[in-house]
Image (spheres, grey):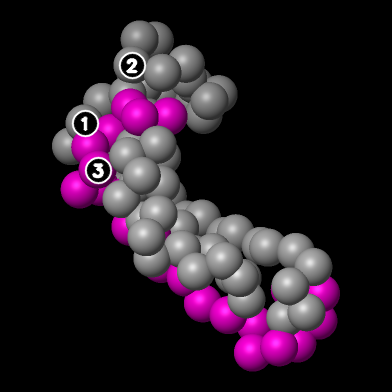
Amino acid sequence: MARSSKPDFFGGGGAAGETAASANVDVTVVAQQPRIGPHVAAMRANVANALGITEGQVGIKATTNEGLGFIGRGEGVAAMAVAAVEWP
């Protein structure tokens, strides 16, 4: 597991000098358009770089809103992310 060299966004919580480590991150993008398939590799690299983890620890997938609501009309995009975080 990679230890992040980025600032501690987890507010401490452990013993002095301990930092949390992201075990993995899973991102879901909800959009009718554009298709994100051609952009997944770049998105994975950017998320990994921002969190100080490897690209193998980042999962990115997409879904549509089946034409419903503002997302379905193509007026917006939503994203949800879940991260598994481990303390030393």
Side of 21 relative to 80 (left or right): left
Which is nearer the eye, 53 or 83? 53
> Which residue is drawn at the image coordinates 21% and 31% (left, top)?
2
User: Is residue 53 within the magenta segment?
Assistant: yes
Asked if residue 61 is positioned above or below residue 25 in the image, the reply reads: below
Image coords of residue 37 (percent x, y): 38, 65
> Which residue is drawn at the image coordinates 51% and 29% (left, top)?
10
Element on which disc 1 rests: loop
Q: Amino acid at mark 2?
A: Ser
> Which residue is drawn at the image coordinates 46% and 63% (left, top)?
36
* Residue identified by numbered label 3: 55
* Residue identified by numbered label 1: 2
- The reply to whether the C-beta atoms of the residues labelled 2 and 3 are less than 8 Å apart is no
Residue 26 visible in the shown view: no
Residue 57 visible in the shown view: yes
Q: Tag on residue 72?
A: none
CA–CA distance between discs 2 and 3?
15 Å
* Residue identified by numbered label 2: 5
Side of 88 relative to 51 (left or right): left
Side of 67 relative to 39 (left or right): right
- In which quarter of the view is residue 31 placed? bottom right
Q: Which residues are magenta?
A: 49-71
